[in-house]
Every structure is written in C-alpha cells, then in structure tokens.
Image (cartoon, rainbow, N blue to C red):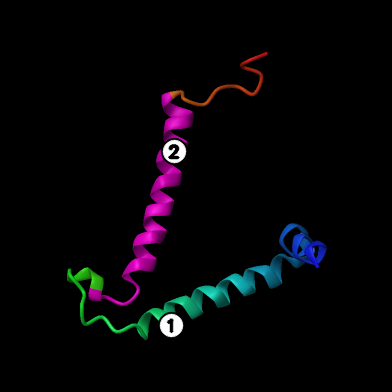
C-alpha cells in the first residue's frame, strides 16, 4: 500500500494525475470556503470568501522569496563542502 503512495508522489509518469488531484482538492477547498457561515467575523476581511486561502498562499510565497533572498544575497547559505 505504501509503495503505491510513494510511487504516485515520486514517479514522473504520475505527474498529470497528481496535478489534477491537487487542482481538484484546491477547488473543493475554495468551494467549501464559500459555504462557511461568517456571521461572527471580527474584521471585514474575515468575512470575505477565499480570504484565508489567498492570505495563506501569499504568505507562503513571500516566505519562500524572503528565505531565498537571505540565503543567496545576504550570505546565510554556505557551500556544500563548507565544513570539510
């Protein structure tokens, strides 16, 4: 069972079905977000459907770019053989 799961996520021949599965899950999450009752939202943006998904995506992308900037431009990243 676990071999089939590892093959599905690691093998290149399953790239198209894997991408379709992820898009399907993404669409289902966005549709489910429209079904949530938001009568107790504290802020205006909390009442917007899809806000959490957009905020999470933008935060993740920003975190990746900031960490790459710190690693490559600022010099926090070292060569692979730095400690040899």
How crowded is the residue under tag 1: few (<14 C-alpha within 10 Å), some, or many (20+)?
A: few
Considering the image in quadrants, where does the N terminus appear?
bottom right
How crowded is the residue under tag 2: few (<14 C-alpha within 10 Å), some, or many (20+)?
A: some
Residue at image x 34%, y 67%? 52
Image side of residue 19 versus residue 28, left or right: right
Instruction: Report the span colored magenta.
Output: 47-74
Image x and y of residue 40, in percent: 20, 78
Residue at image x 47%, y 25%? 76
Does residue 3 lie above or below 71 as drawn? Answer: below
- Residue 27 within the segment the image draws in magenta: no
Which of the marked residues, 2 or 1, is nearer the chain's N terminus? Answer: 1
Q: Which mark is residue 67?
A: 2
Front in this rendered view, residue 21 or 39: 39
Determine whether the residue tagged by mark 1 lies in a helix, strand or loop.
helix
Q: Where, by quadrant of the figure, is residue 17 drawn? A: bottom right
Does residue 73 lie above or below 21 as drawn? Answer: above
Image x and y of residue 34, in percent: 36, 83
Determine whether the residue tagged by mark 2 lies in a helix, strand or loop.
helix
Residue with the most extreme left position: 43
Image side of residue 48 versus residue 25, left or right: left
Residue ID for mark 1:
31
Q: Main secondary structure of the magenta part?
A: helix
In space, the residues marked 2 and 1 are separated at their CA atoms by 32 Å
Image side of residue 41 versus residue 52, left or right: left
Residue at image x 22%, y 69%? 45
């Amino acid at each position: 069972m676990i071999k089939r799961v590892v093959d599905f996520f690691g093998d290149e021949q399953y790239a198209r079905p894997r991408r379709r599965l992820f898009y399907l899950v993404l669409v289902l999450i966005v549709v489910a977000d429209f079904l949530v009752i938001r009568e107790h939202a504290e802020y205006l943006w909390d009442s917007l459907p899809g806000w959490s998904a957009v905020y999470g995506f933008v935060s993740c992308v920003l975190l990746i770019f900031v960490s790459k900037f710190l690693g490559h431009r600022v010099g926090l990243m070292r060569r692979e053989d730095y400690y040899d």
